[in-house]
Amino acid sequence: MKKFISLLIVAVLLVSCMATTALAAGATLTVSNETASAGETVTVSFSISEATFATYQVGLTYDSSVLTLKSIQQGAATQGLFSGGSKASAMNMADYTANGVLFTATFDVADTAPVGTYTVGAAVENFTMADAVTTLSVGVASGSVTVPEAPHVHDYTATVTEPTCEEKGYTTYTCSCGDSYKEDSVDALGHSYDKWVVTKAATCTEAGAETRTCSACGDVETAVIPAAGHSYTYTVNEDGTHTGVCSVCGDKVTAAHEYENNGYCVCGDLKAGTVTEKDEDLDDVPATGDITPMVTFGFVAVISMTAAAAYVLKRKTAK
Ligand SMILES: [Zn+2]
Ligand SMILES: [Zn+2]
Ligand SMILES: [Zn+2]
Ligand SMILES: [Zn+2]
C-alpha cells in the first residue's frame, strides 16, 4: 500500500511539472521601486496581474547590510489565510484570480546606508492550484530601494568686512557649495579729518587755499580761502579826491569822491549841502502812533549824528 502511495506522488509530481508552463502564461509578478533616505522606513509592494491559483509562498531577497525586514503585510489581492513572517504565504480553499498587490514588505533603511540602489527580489517558491498539485511559475521578480544623495543643507561661514570712511561694512556668509549672501550692514564711519592747514595764504586780491587730511584713510579735502579785499585807510585830498592806502598790502589808490552812501563817500567825506537840505518826511511825525514814531526818531538821530560828523570833518578839511 505504501509503495502505491509513493508511486502516486511521483506521478502527481510529474503531472504538475508538465502543467507548469501552460498555466503560467500571462501571469507576472512585479516588485515596486522605492526611494528612502538612510534611517527611514520604506514599504515595497509585490503585485501580480491576472494569475489564478489557490496558494502562494514568496520569499524575499535583499541586501541585509542596508535593509532590515520589519514586517510583511497582506495585500488586497490576497485571499484566504495569510501569513507574513520572513516570507509571504497565503492559502485559499479554492482557486481565485488575483490582480493587484499580493503583499507589501516594510524595511528599515540603515542609518549608515550608502547612496545607491538596492535590489529587492521576490523569490517565488510556489503558486499552487486548489488541487494542491498544480504549481504555477510566475518567474522571479525584482524591484529596488534607492537611497538618494542627501539634499544639500547650506552651512554658512561668516566673514566680516569692516566699514571704511566712505564704504559701508557688512558680513558675507558663504557656503562651501559657493552660495553666499551679504547681511548685517554697518554704516560708513565718515572721515576723521585733522584741523585745516593753510597751504596758500589769501592776499587782498588773490584767493588762498587750505587742506585737511583724514587720519584714517588719508583723504585730503581742499577749500578755497577767499581774497580778503583791501583794507584802505583814506585821506581826503584838497582837490576833491581821496587817497586810500591798504594797511595790509600797501596798495594805494587816489580817486574822486563818490557820494553813494546817503551823501557820504567811502572816505567819509560828505557831499556839500547834503545835511542842509530839508527832508520833508522828517517833519511829519505823527502825534499818536505805534512803532512808527520810534523808527522815525531813530532815523532823525542818525541824521543828526551824521550832520555832527560832517561838521567835524569839514573843520578838519578846512584847516
Ligand atoms: Zn550650500
Ligand atoms: Zn577717511
Ligand atoms: Zn591790500
Ligand atoms: Zn572820498
Image (cartoon, rainbow, N blue to C red):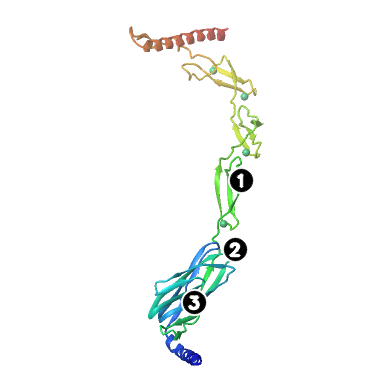
Distance of label 2 from label 3 (alpha carbons):
28 Å
Q: Give the x, y percent position of residue 55.
A: 43, 79
Disc 3 marks which residue? 58
Looking at the image, is mark 1 or mark 2 earlier in the sequence? 2
Between 62 and 218, which is closer to the camera in this rendering?
A: 62
Determine the residue positioned at 50% across, 70% down: 85
Q: Classify residue 161 as left or right of residue 145.
A: right
Determine the residue positioned at 49% across, 77% down: 58
Between 179 and 4, which is closer to the camera in this rendering?
A: 4
Image depth: mark 2 or mark 3 in front: 3
Q: Looking at the picture, which amino acid does disc 1 mark?
A: Thr
Disc 2 marks which residue? 112
Distance of label 1 from label 3 (alpha carbons):
66 Å
For this orientation, the residue located farthest to the front is 1
Disc 3: CA contacts within 10 A as few (<14), some (14-19) or many (>=20): many
Looking at the image, is mark 1 or mark 3 earlier in the sequence? 3
**Relative to 203, residue 216 above or below:** below
Disc 2: CA contacts within 10 A as few (<14), some (14-19) or many (>=20): few
Disc 1 marks which residue? 161
Quarter where residue 102 is shown: bottom left
Between 268 and 236, which is closer to the camera in this rendering?
A: 268
Distance of label 1 from label 2 (alpha carbons):
40 Å
